[in-house]
Amino acid sequence: MTPSAKDCRPKHRESNSPSAKNNLILISPDGQFDLVLLEQIREGIEGAFGFPTVIRSLLDDVEFAYDPKRRQYHSTAILEQLAAVAPPEAYKVLAITRVDLFIPILTYVFGEAQLGGKACIISTHRLMGAGPVVTGVDLYARMAKEAKHELGHTFNLQHCRDPACLMHYCRSEVDVDRKMDQLCRYCRVLLMDALKKLEAEKDGVRQRIKTPAGLAESDKYSKN
Ligand SMILES: [Zn+2]
Ligand SMILES: [Zn+2]
């Protein structure tokens, strides 16, 4: 637990548009994790998305999302809370937890993301903790892949049919191991387009700061 980490700043600000100050990706661990794992995920994210990425816990725990009937945690509730408490400098937030996550229509999920939104989450529970111990499998690489997969959704990437692509939907951890640690060409182009759009939005923000007359344009950039 990280008692000092809870962010108590006022909720809500802003749109989903980046500004010069709003360009970090935050990794928010729920509890303690091996620093090697966190660093592997952090480096992977920076490499894939090009945003400075830092590790900082935003939630004391995720007990508010516990469903006693299912004995699992509702990931959508965690995402909403993360997005609400995210500090202004966080453009995207990825939570990492050990608890078993679900959404109502599925038995469990490895993670969940707000498509085109701010928050996503992954859990070690199914990816690292359950099932027989597999030797020769890089469990940290598995987590890093799913971290990038969920973040990809926050950049508006959807599931890809290519089983080797990072954005392929995986039903089992074996499927995760099978896919590559990178996007297929098609998804890469989509991500580049999304990132270019963000750059254009940032330029727009800068221009609006310089020229107040440009403020009328702001709505154009605030939604996706
Ligand atoms: Zn997905
Ligand atoms: Zn793809």
Image (cartoon, rainbow, N blue to C red):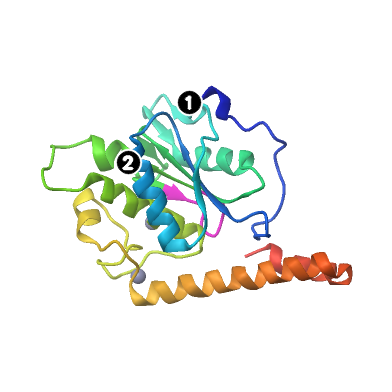
Q: Which mark is residue 159?
A: none
Q: Give the range drawn in magenta.
A: 112-119
Q: Which residue lies furthest to the right in this view?
A: 213
The residue sitting at 42% across, 29% down in the picture is: 31
Q: Residue 36 carries which label?
A: 2
Which quadrant of the view contains residue 45? Answer: bottom left
> Residue 155 magenta-drawn?
no
Seen from the viewer's position, the closer of residues 187 and 67 is: 187
Residue 107 makes an appearance in the image: no
Seen from the viewer's position, the closer of residues 180 and 157 is: 180
Which quadrant of the view contains residue 18? Answer: bottom right
Vertical comparison of 98 with 196: above or below: above
The residue sitting at 49% across, 31% down in the picture is: 65
Q: Residue 170, position in %: x, y? A: 28, 56
Q: Please state if 37 lies on the left or on the right of 42 as rendered.
A: left
Residue 52 makes an appearance in the image: yes
Q: Is mark 2 on a helix, strand or loop?
A: helix
Q: Tag 1: residue type?
A: Glu
Q: How would you rate the neighbour count of disc 1 (Cα within 10 Å): few for under 14, some for 14-19, many for 20 or more?
A: few
Q: Residue 116, position in %: x, y? A: 54, 60
The secondary structure that most of the magenta stretch takes on is loop
Q: Tag 2: residue type?
A: Val
Which quadrant of the view contains residue 162? Answer: bottom left
The residue sitting at 71% across, 52% down in the picture is: 14
Q: How would you rate the neighbour count of disc 2 (Cα within 10 Å): few for under 14, some for 14-19, many for 20 or more?
A: few
Seen from the viewer's position, the closer of residues 54 and 176 is: 54
Q: Is mark 1 on a helix, strand or loop?
A: helix
Q: Which mark is residue 63?
A: 1
